Image (tube, rainbow, N blue to C red):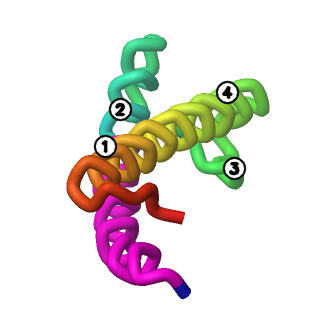
Amino acid sequence: MKASKVAYKPVGLALGFVSGMIASRLFRQAWKMLGNDQDAPDATDEDRTWSEVLLAASLQGAVFSAVKAAVDRAGATATRRLTGTWPD
């Protein structure tokens, strides 16, 4: 295993945690912007409609994926600037 990969591992873990926190906050804000006063429904929430559950799941997946990609890319770019190598 490359030394750069080993060195990036803790950075990647920390960035994953941070991206989860950011994505969670953005998702809650986006859900409220859609006019929903309640929290997003769980898949097993009996009182919510199929469309609400599927919309919430789709929005959450999109937000989490976009934030994760942005944070991972920023971390890799910063690592290259600091070390001169791209983390694998």
Q: Which of the two labelled residues, at mark 3 and mark 1, occupies the earlier sequence position?
A: 1
Q: Name the residue under label 2.
A: 26
Main secondary structure type of the part rendered in magenta: helix
Q: Residue 22 carries which label?
A: 1
Q: Quadrant of the N terminus?
A: bottom right
**Magenta region, residue range:** 2-23
Q: How far apart are marks 1 and 4 (CA)?
A: 20 Å
The one nearer the camera, 65 or 88, is 88
In the image, is residue 44 part of the stretch drawn in magenta? Answer: no
Q: In this view, does 39 lie above or below 13?
A: above
Q: Which residue lies furthest to the left in this view?
A: 82
| Residue in view at x 38 percent, y 66 percent | 12
Marks 4 and 3, the one that precedes in the sequence: 3
The percent coordinates of residue 83 (x first, y second) are 27, 61
Residue for badge 4: 55
Q: Does the CB distance between marks 1 and 2 fall below 8 Å? A: yes
Q: How far apart are marks 2 and 3 (CA)?
A: 20 Å
Residue drawn at (67%, 27%) of the image? 55
Residue furthest to the front? 84
